[in-house]
Image (cartoon, rainbow, N blue to C red):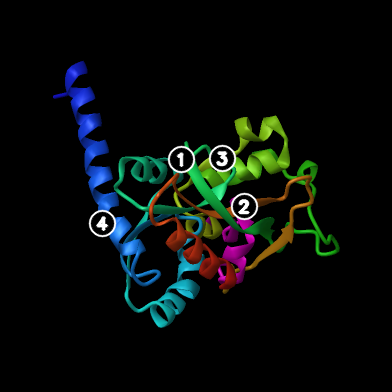
Amino acid sequence: MRFTPLGDQIADKARRVLREAEELGDLARAAGRPLSGEMRMSVIPTIAPFMLPRVLPLLRRDYPDLRLFLREEPSGPACEGLHSGRTDCVLLALPYACGEVAAQPLFEDRLFVAAPEDEADAAAASVRPSEIDEHRLLLLEDGHCLKDHALAACNRPELRAEAAMMGTSLHTIVQMVDNGLGVTMLPEMALKAGILDHTAIVASPLEAEHPSRTIALVWRRASPREKDFRLLADVLSAAQ
């Protein structure tokens, strides 16, 4: 079953009405204590397991009245949920076309090239894109923006055609690399969180013109809870 053209218009209008009704409650909460009440935040999979364990205890300690409901999902569905009103804010990596949103950058997350010890050049302080074997590059499957950030940082069009985009998570890809199936690119936050612990993998910084992604918090423009979102962004940034 699907909507008729008129049904699509009615459903779209209904979603806007519901979102505006929710914002009435947001206005009331914004006049109260900062970072209190319910908040729904989507977080992309290449950030959630590495950043949230550090941040959530701080939020519970400093803002005990905040009820933060989390949803882990790729950037596309997260941004769709933001605009439909399903979620209030999104923690994601830029650049990404998330539509008409307000954003507060938190920090730069550098990319590293990870390879088995027997393939890595121990004397090299960094790895240039030209040194990456496109036939052995393992990346996340389509839908994960880290794949696009990694390919853009390398600025090698042939990588997009030749790279094996098969991983469903960074942990899965790390296991492939540890078993000699190829090399990959990992964000610095994953390394700091210990994703390479108990592996025989060496990670070296990517030496490129734009070797990082920007971690940011985004929300709908003109949201009545903008002060809360900016305060949350400050907490997320300070936790690094």
Q: Quadrant of the N terminus?
A: top left
14 shown above or below 3: below
Q: Earlier in the sequence, mark 2 or mark 1?
A: 1
The mark lying in front, picked from 1 and 4, is 4
122 shown above or below 111: below
- The dot on residue 25 is 4
Is residue 145 something one can see in this rendering? Answer: yes
Instruction: Assign a secondary structure to mark 3.
Output: strand
Q: Which residue is mark 1?
A: 143
Please tell me which residue is depicted at 31% across the width and 57% down the height of the picture: 26
For the view shown, which residue lies furthest in the right direction? 123
Q: Earlier in the sequence, mark 3 or mark 1?
A: 1
Q: Nearer the viewer, residue 25 or 37?
A: 25
Instruction: Assign a secondary structure to mark 2.
Output: strand
Please tell me which residue is depicted at 23% across the width and 31% down the height of the picture: 13
- Report x, y in % for residue 119: 73, 57
Q: Magenta stretch: give its range.
A: 176-195
- Report x, y in % for residue 48: 45, 61
The residues tagged by marks 3 and 1 sit, at their Cα atoms, a distance apart of: 14 Å
The residues tagged by marks 2 and 4 sit, at their Cα atoms, a distance apart of: 31 Å
The mark lying in front, picked from 3 and 4, is 4
As shown in the figure, which amino acid type bears the numbered disc 4? Answer: Gly
- The dot on residue 81 is none
| Residue 213 part of the magenta-drawn span | no
Q: Nearer the viewer, residue 163 or 67?
A: 67
As shown in the figure, which amino acid type bears the numbered disc 2? Answer: Thr
The mark lying in front, picked from 2 and 4, is 4
The residues tagged by marks 1 and 4 sit, at their Cα atoms, a distance apart of: 33 Å
- Report x, y in % for residue 223: 40, 49
Instruction: Assign a secondary structure to mark 4.
Output: helix
- The dot on residue 214 is 2
